[in-house]
Amino acid sequence: MTGPVQQEQVILEQLASGTRTVVSELRGGKDFISRLAGMGISIGCPIEVLQNPASGPLLVRVRDTRIALGRGEAAKISVRKPEGEPPRGE
């Protein structure tokens, strides 16, 4: 008998614009995670990458709200790898 299949994770900043996925892990201190929760970003919530330029902040949609995230913030958010879509830059 095998356990549940773990879905592959990627970092939010690696996803292309237009990608929809689900938050799977938040890394960072208590204050950072609390701040994300205040913006509506929590484990299990759907998230859509609206804009991911080559540099600068990412624009995402979470719970019908647009949020700009710095690259450092986006690097601390892991999401489920969308099926059939390679991460940005590959």
Image (cartoon, helix red, strand yellow):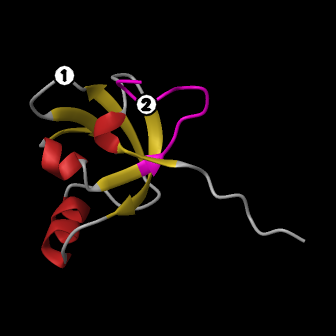
Q: Residue at x 31, y 53 (%)?
A: 77
Q: CA distance from mark 1 to mark 2?
A: 14 Å
Q: Amino acid at mark 2?
A: Pro
Q: Give the answer, above or below, for where 44 lies relative to 79.
A: below
* Position of residue 58 measured from the top left corner of the image (x, y, whole percent): 19, 33
Magenta range = 79-90
Q: Is residue 27 left or right of residue 3?
A: left
Residue 35 image-quadrant placement: bottom left
Q: Is residue 85 left or right of residue 58?
A: right
| Residue denoted by label 2 | 87
Q: Main secondary structure of the magenta part?
A: loop
Asked if residue 31 lies in the magenta stretch, the reply is no
Nearest to the observer: residue 4 or residue 46: 4
Question: Regarding mark 2 in the picture, which secondary structure is present there?
Answer: loop
Q: Residue at x 42, y 24 (%)?
A: 90
Q: Amino acid at mark 1?
A: Pro
* Position of residue 10 measured from the top left corner of the image (x, y, whole percent): 43, 45
